[in-house]
Each structure stands twice: as C-alpha cells, then as structure tokens.
Amino acid sequence: MTDDVKEIFGSGGTAPAPPAPAALAAKVRTLAPSMTRSMQRVAEAVADDPAGCAALTVTKLAELTGTSEATVVRTARLLGYPGYRDLRLALAGLAAQQQSGRAPAITTDIAVDDPIADVVAKLAYDEQQTLADTAAGLDTVQLAAAVTALAGARRTDVYGVGASGLVAQDLTQKLLRIGLLAHAHSDPHLAVTNAVQLRPGDVAIAVTHSGTTGDVIEPLRVAFEHGATTVAVTGRPDSPVTQYADHVLTTSTARESELRPAAMSSRTGQLLVVDCLFVGVAQRTYDAAAPALAASYEALAHRHRAARRGP
Amino acid sequence: MTDDVKEIFGSGGTAPAPPAPAALAAKVRTLAPSMTRSMQRVAEAVADDPAGCAALTVTKLAELTGTSEATVVRTARLLGYPGYRDLRLALAGLAAQQQSGRAPAITTDIAVDDPIADVVAKLAYDEQQTLADTAAGLDTVQLAAAVTALAGARRTDVYGVGASGLVAQDLTQKLLRIGLLAHAHSDPHLAVTNAVQLRPGDVAIAVTHSGTTGDVIEPLRVAFEHGATTVAVTGRPDSPVTQYADHVLTTSTARESELRPAAMSSRTGQLLVVDCLFVGVAQRTYDAAAPALAASYEALAHRHRAARRGP
DNA sequence: CACGAAATGAAAGATATTTTCATCCGGCCC
DNA sequence: GGGCCGGATGAAAATATCTTTCATTTCGTG
C-alpha cells in the first residue's frame, strides 16, 4: 500500500519531496488510505477548512480533532511537509488563493443595495479599467506633439468647466510648479477674453469629456484662430471640439450607470492624460523643472507640522 | 449596518483590526514614514520578497535585515498583526496569491529619458496600483460610518489645499449634485470661520495627503470641538490630522520619485475615496439623489452642442 | 555639551513545535 | 482463550520559536 503511494508521488517520502503547493485536498484523499484513523481525522479537518486550520496552533488542532500534537505533526509529515509549522504556512497560502479566486462579482453595475465593500471594489475596478483603456488608446504621437508645444509655450491656457474644470486646474497647478506660465479658466467669458491674447507659440488646452461643451469650445476656437497651438482632451475624438484642435488626446470612459454618471468616470482618464502631459513637459525641461519642483516643495514645508510618531 | 460589513469580512477573528490580507506592500508604504530606520529595513525586506520572508524565522529575518528579533516583532505589530507569527502567515498567503496571480509589473521609476510611451505605461500602472492598494486598505467600517454621517448631515464642509483642494472640490461638486449642502474651503481663514458654525450632526472632512497640513487641520479641529462629525482622508493614518477625526479614511500612495511627487500620486487614491463616499451617500439617499442627478443632467444639456459627424 | 526621549538589541520569559518514550490496542499464533 | 507482537497513540520532555523586558545606545535639542 505504502509502496503504491510512493510510486504515484514519485521520489521518497520526506526529504526530497516538494512541499505540496496547492493540491492539498487531492493529496489528502490520495493518502488517506495509508493513514491511521486519528491521522485521517486530522487530514480531514485540514482539507475541510484550510483557512480555519491555518489559524490554529498544533495544540488547538489536536484538541479539535480529538488527537494529540504528535499525531498532527505526523500527519503534516505524511503530507510532505517538514513539520506542522510548514503545513500551516502552506495552508495560509491555500486559503489566500481560494479567497482571491472567488473574486469577481465586480462585473456588475453598482446597485442601490450593494454593500459598501462592493462599491469600493467596483469603483476601483472601473477606474483601473479606465486607466488601462486610456493608456492603451492614447496616441503617443499626438501626446508628444502636445508636450513639445507645451514645453516651448510662452503661456498656456486651459479650459474646462464642471468636473473637467478640476482637471484643468490640476494641470495648471502642475505646470506652474515647474515654472510654466499656465492658467485655468472656468469662466467662459474670461476664457474667451484671454484667448484673444494668444499668439502662435502659445498653447490652449480644452478639457471636455463630451467634446460638445460650448463654454469650452468657444475659447479654444478663438485661440485656434489666433494661431495658438490647440489641444483637446476629450472622450469623443469625433466631437465638435476637435475641429479646432491641432492635437487630440482621447480619454476612455468606463461604463456609466445611474449611480456613476459619465462626468464622474471620465475624470480618471483625463487626469491620466494630464499627468502624462506634465511628466512629458518636466522631462523636456528637466534642467528648469527639477529645481522648480524642489523649490515648491521647500516652500510648502513650513506649512506642515512635524509628523508625530506613534507610541 | 455594521453587521453587513462584518459579514463581508468574514468572522471577526481579531475584532477591531482586520489583519491586512493582500495590501501589504501598500501598507508598508503607507506606514513607512512613521517607522524607525531599522523597522523600515525590516518592512522593506518583507515587502520586497514576501515569499522569501515567509520562509524565515524571526531570528533569521532579524539577521538578514541586520536588526534584532524585537525590531522584527515591533514591525509586525505596526503592520497590524498581533505578532511575527501572524505576519508570517499573511506573508505566505500573499506569496501564494502573487504566485497564482498576475504579471510581474513595471518596476522601474520614470526616468528623464524615458520615451513618452513608457511614461504613459508607467503612470497608468502606478495609478492602477494606487487604486488597488487604496481599495484593499480602505476600512469599510470607517467608510460606512462616514457615509452615514454625510447622508444625515445638515451641512458638510470639506477642507483641502493645493492638490487636495481639487479633491475637496470634486467631492463638494458631487454632493451638491445629489442635493446635499456641501462647501469646499481652500482659504484657511474662511474655513475656520465657517467651522465655528458647525454643530453636532454636521460633517467636516479634511483632505490631506501628509496629514500635517496646518491649514487643513485647524478647521477640522474647530469643527471637531464644535461637535461636528469629522472625517480625515489622508495617506498617513498616524498623522496629526487624525487627532481630530472621528473617522479616518486611509489612502495608499504609489512610490514617488523626482518626476512624480507625492502630491501627484496621492490624488488618485483620494479621488477613489471621494467617489466611494459619493456613491455610498447616493445609495443611502437614493430616493432624493436619483431625481437630483437626473435634474442636474437635464439642466446641463442645453450647454452642449449636438454632436456633429455621424459614422 | 549635557540632557532627555526615542530607538535598539541582548537576554530572560512565554509559547509553540518536535521528539521521545511508555502505554495501549488489535490481531494472530499456539 | 491467553499470550505475544507490532504498530498506533498520546503524555510529557526537549527543543525551537516567538515575545517581552530592560539596559544601552543613539539622536536630536536646548
């Protein structure tokens, strides 16, 4: 009997045997016949609830199965581990695998009665998806062109209203940090007024998910007509805003739903594009950007209290 | 409510602190700043090679990192485990997950001479990572509590300056959309002035990555002392801001580098938290939120031109 | 430059695991 | 049926591992 088992499992019992990775339940079943009664009880408990057993000490598991520590250790040995400690480790791994295996209930829409943990998971998943899609769909040639224009611009105006307005501000903040003259406009009147000032060599950027926001298209048109280099960051590469854009940067959108309007999910992709623009420009103007970044960091330091250490 | 959460997270082994399952690397990064030098060495080793460390005893790991057993245990404690034994178990689980899991990752930092396509890939990857880590590390009990407070608040004030200010605005915009009275403050004086008005039942939210921004802590403190329910969204769960926070929502940070300052990478996690808050509140107040969302959509429609160009 | 607080590691103390060994149980031959 | 044998089993000793304590060192500060 024991010989058969050995044969099936290859080389000899303890020493050279690879500590079983995952197929534990199977191993238990296979080896069960060659086990003594009390060892079987232990093995069964282990196969039944790996996660639970992983939390138990030798003594506890012995108690639970109505056996002794020695028996538990013997069982562990039979299963191919040097001792109970290692079996326990493997058990923890197995539990974790099972856990992560039965994950994705996240493909569904967010429902009104989803528990909060599901909401977190779904939102995170959707945003990750948006990032992946946007990154994959981003035209690096257009991006590089936009970066070049930004890096050499005398001044840069960024237009965005609503949720996209925040993205526009984010970009502006970043560009200012590395010493570029940038301004975000969310007031359409002022935006147009300023757009008139733009000249060739300047840059105007419009951020709009739909690509149909008049308040953003107008200033971009004006900038375009005054010879500025114009960039559109939009989720719709065929939308009106692209008419006046020298370079179009397309963002991807996650599925939307009632509890997750488009305006909300578009933000993630837009911000990725903005970050790419920023880093791109920072690379191009590194000699100026690096000290500027360091300086702005220094300047802020005194506004932070010293972090306290936990006890 | 609390029951739901408990259910999701399985039996409450250690009731108050669910020992981190997978978000270990994230946790290390989050807590690293509050660690001492030698603890950091241990934490780094652990985050670097979970599988390897899982095979080590306390003594060996102490040796490997050039520290003592005591330090290893202290580190394990800080990471949220009762002792090294449990950290080791979690490590084994993590290793197993990684094993069975996914692609290796893009581990390099963004360099000055990276081609633009690499920049896009790295940024996207980092932000995805941040999302995953933040989602995994988010305490859903705290989140649920914050949502409940928000849903029932008479008014809500949100504080944030710099990059976090945009996040604060984002949250405010969203809450306004579903009919809640919310206001974002980036002027610290006005913020404090307004915080004085808050009463029990009102909510104050501070957004700060470092958790040490005085301009944000002050108004939160005032709000706290006036009995408002206070929430902190921060990357540093042990920072000063949490002193005055009834509920702490921790965001995870991606590694940072010269071309990718902390302020930049923190935004992604903060926005995820904000989205979760929003959706949570929208669920709770669905009957009021759904029509409000629809109404705001309607109201905006006329500001969009019809999309031209069909296929 | 001395002071105090925090950090650190050596070693004692507490637990958990492994080994040892005496006992027990079941079958088998006489 | 009794006695003997061989493996199965658990109690307890021995060891390894983990945790705590406490004295020493280090570092920042006035």
Image (spheres, coloured by chain):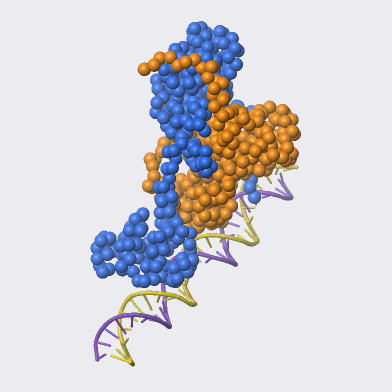
Chain colours: A blue, B orange, C purple, D yellow
Q: Nearer the viewer, residue A267 or A290?
A: A267
Q: Is residue A279 visible?
A: no
Task: Determine the image quadrant of residue B299.
Answer: top right
The answer to whether residue B257 is seen in the rendering is yes
**Residue B139: percent from the left, percent from the top?**
56, 45
Which residue sits at x=43%, y=54%?
A95
Q: What quarter of the picture does the C terminus of chain B occupy?
A: top left
Judge whether A301 appears above or below A282 on screen.
below
Q: Is residue A269 left or right of residue B140?
A: left
Residue B270, picture quadrant: top right
Q: Is residue B39 above or below residue B186?
A: below
Query: Which quadrant of the view contains residue A41?
Result: bottom left
- What's the residue at 61%, 43% (across, down)? B145
Q: Is residue A25 above or below residue A160?
A: below
Left/right of residue A190 with respect to residue A77 in the rendered view: right
Residue at 49% across, 38% down: A111
